C-alpha cells in the first residue's frame, strides 16, 4: 500500500512551527514497511484541504492527515473531509458525553466551541484517542481511506500506534517485520555505511542511518519469512564489522550506558568543564537515580579558575594556554581528586565562532582520569558547520558525546581508538 501524508496548519505552512509530526510519521511508517510516497503541507482552508486529499487519493491507497481537529474555527479538517465525502457534519452523542466528563473531571466549564470536537462527517469511523479528547477519524472516500489524526504530537502518536498501523497492516497484507536500532558513537555516518556494505546486501534486510552530532543510529529492518532470524543475523554481523563503536540498542543512550557501567563497578565520576559549560554534568544528571554514580562537576570557564579550583599547574597554563592536551588531563585528575570520584573527565577547547589563542574552531581536548593509569587524552577533529551560535551548539554537543564515549571505553578497558580503524585516519573522520 502506498501512503501519502498531509499536515494541516497555517503555522506549519508559514514556518512558525517545525513539522515534527510528518518526520515522525515518515519514520514510523517506514519502520513498519509502509511505502510513503509524498508529504504535503497545506494551510487552514477547507477547499485547499479537499483538493489535497482528493489529489493524494488519486495516487495512493491511503492518506494520513494531522491537525485541524481541534475546537477552534480554523480547525477545518473535519469540515473538509465531510465536503470531500459529500456528507454533513453530525454531532456524536458519545463524544459529546465524553467532553462533559473530561471537563467535570478537571472542574472546568465547557465553552460552546468545544463541541466542535464532537462533530464528525456522517458515516466516519472514530479512532480511539486514549491520550486526549479529540478522536481521530477514518473516512472512506473514492480511491481509498483517509485517517485524520490530531496535531498534538503525543495524541497523534498514540492513535497511530494503537489504531492506524494495525489497520494499515491488515489492509495491505504486509509481511512480518522485525526491527532493531543499534547506537554508535565517534564514527562518521559514511564510515559506518561503508563498513556495513555487505549487510546492506543481505536478502530481506534494510538499513537506515540516523545521524546525530557524533553519533549514528542504525535502524535494522528485516521482513518476510523468518524475519526474526534475518534480524538476528544482521545484528550479529553489524557488531562484528563495527566492534566496540556499537555502544547500545534502542533507547539505551550513552549516558545510561555510562551510568550502568559505573554502577556495576561501584564507581563514580566527576566532570571538569570549560567549553561545554556544564553540558556534561547536565547529560549525566538527566537519568533518575544518577546521583548514585555522578559525584558532581566544576565549570572552570576562566583560565585562572582551572588553576585555583582544579589544580591545573599555573606554569602549564602560562606556557600553553587553556587549550592543550595536558590541561585536559590535569582538569580530569584535578576534579577526580577534589570531588573524591573514581573517575574524572576534563574538557577544554574552542567552540567558536572565532579561533582562540591560535587554535582553530573545533580544537577540543578531552581527558579521562581513573584508578591505576595516567589520564587518557583524545583530540577528536570536529567539523565546523554553519556560523555563529550554530557552530558553538554543534561543537559543544559533539564534545559531550566524545567525552562520554571516552569514559565508556575507559570503563571497559578499551583503547581510545578500539574498533575505529587506523587512529590517525579515524580522527580525520570522526564527527
Image: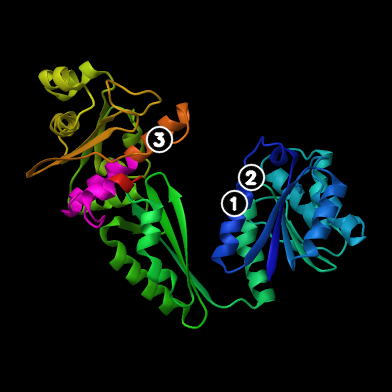
The residue lying toward the viewer, choosing from 229 and 151, is: 229
In the rendered image of this protein, does residue 248 appear above or below residue 69? Answer: below
Quadrant of res 302: top left
Q: Which residues are magenta?
A: 400-427
Please tell me how crowded label 3 is: few (under 14), some (14-19), or many (20+) other residues with Cα within 10 Å: some
Q: Which mark is residue 23?
A: 1
Which quarter of the rendered picture does the C terminus lie within? top left
Pointers 3 and 1 in contact (CB under 8 A)? no
Residue corresponding to mark 2: 19
Picture coordinates of residue 39 (x, y %)?
68, 54
Spatial CA span between label 3 and label 1:
26 Å
Q: Regarding mark 3 in the picture, which secondary structure is present there?
A: loop
Residue corresponding to mark 3: 384
The residue at 81%/59% (across/down) is: 55
Please tell me how crowded label 1 is: few (under 14), some (14-19), or many (20+) other residues with Cα within 10 Å: few
Picture coordinates of residue 154 (x, y %)?
60, 50
Determine the main secondary structure of the stretch shown in magenta: helix
Please tell me how crowded label 2 is: few (under 14), some (14-19), or many (20+) other residues with Cα within 10 Å: some
Pointers 1 and 2 in contact (CB under 8 A)? yes
Spatial CA span between label 2 and label 3:
26 Å
Picture coordinates of residue 108 (x, y %)?
72, 38
Q: Regarding mark 1 in the picture, which secondary structure is present there?
A: helix
Amino acid at each position: 500500500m502506498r501512503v501519502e501524508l498531509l499536515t494541516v496548519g497555517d503555522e506549519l505552512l508559514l514556518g512558525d512551527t517545525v513539522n515534527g509530526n510528518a518526520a515522525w510519521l515518515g519514520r514510523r511508517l517506514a519502520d513498519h514497511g509502509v511505502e510513503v510516497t509524498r508529504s504535503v503541507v497545506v494551510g487552514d482552508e477547507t477547499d485547499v484541504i479537499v483538493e489535497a486529499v482528493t489529489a493524494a487519493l488519486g495516487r495512493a491507497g491511503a492518506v494520513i492527515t494531522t491537525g485541524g481537529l481541534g475546537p477552534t474555527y480554523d480547525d477545518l479538517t473535519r469540515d473538509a473531509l465531510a465536503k470531500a465525502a459529500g456528507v454533513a457534519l453530525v454531532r456524536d452523542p458519545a463524544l459529546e458525553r465524553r467532553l462533559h466528563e473530561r471537563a467535570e473531571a478537571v472542574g472546568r466549564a465547557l465553552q460552546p466551541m468545544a463541541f466542535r470536537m464532537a462533530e464528525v462527517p456522517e458515516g466516519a469511523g472514530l479512532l480511539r484517542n486514549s491520550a486526549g479528547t479529540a478522536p481521530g477519524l477514518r473516512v472512506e472516500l473514492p480511491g481509498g481511506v483517509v485517517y485524520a489524526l490530531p496535531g498534538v504530537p503525543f495524541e497523534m502518536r498514540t492513535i497511530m500506534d494503537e489504531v492506524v498501523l494495525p489497520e494499515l497492516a491488515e489492509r495491505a497484507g504486509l509481511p512480518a517485520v522485525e526491527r532493531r536500532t543499534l547506537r554508535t558513537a565517534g564514527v562518521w555516518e559514511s564510515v559506518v555505511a561503508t563498513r556495513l556494505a555487505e549487510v546492506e546486501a543481505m536478502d530481506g534486510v534494510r538499513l537506515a542511518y540516523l545521524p546525530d552530532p557524533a553519533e549514528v543510529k542504525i535502524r535494522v529492518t528485516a521482513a518476510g519469512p523468518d524475519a526474526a532470524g534475518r534480524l538476528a543475523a544482521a545484528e550479529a554481523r553489524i557488531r562484528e564489522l563495527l566492534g566496540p563503536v556499537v555502544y547500545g540498542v534502542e533507547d539505551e543512550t550513552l549516558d545510561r550506558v555510562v551510568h550502568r557501567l559505573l554502577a556495576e563497578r561501584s564507581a563514580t565520576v566527576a566532570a571538569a568543564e570549560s567549553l561545554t559549560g556544564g553540558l556534561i554534568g547536565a547529560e549525566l544528571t538527566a537519568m533518575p537515580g544518577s546521583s548514585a554514580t555522578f559525584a558532581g562537576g566544576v565549570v572552570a570557564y576562566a583560565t585562572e579558575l582551572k588553576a585555583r579550583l582544579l589544580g591545573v599547574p599555573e606554569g602549564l597554563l602560562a606556557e600553553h594556554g587553556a587549550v592543550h592536551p595536558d590541561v585536559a588531563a590535569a582538569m580530569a585528575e584535578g576534579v577526580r581528586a577534589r570531588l573524591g570520584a573514581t573517575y574524572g573527565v576534563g574538557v577544554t577547547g574552542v567552540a567558536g565562532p572565532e579561533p582562540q589563542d591560535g587554535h582553530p574552531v573545533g580544537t577540543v581536548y578531552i581527558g579521562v582520569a581513573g584508578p591505576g593509569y595516567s589520564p587518557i587524552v583524545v583530540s577528536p577533529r570536529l567539523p565546523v558547520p554553519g556560523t555563529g551560535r550554530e557552530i558553538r551548539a554543534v561543537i559543544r554537543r559533539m564534545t559531550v558525546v566524545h567525552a562520554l564515549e571516552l569514559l565508556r571505553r575507559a570503563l571497559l578497558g578499551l583503547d581510545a581508538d578500539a574498533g575505529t580503524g587506523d587512529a590517525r585516519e579515524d580522527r580525520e573522520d570522526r564527527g
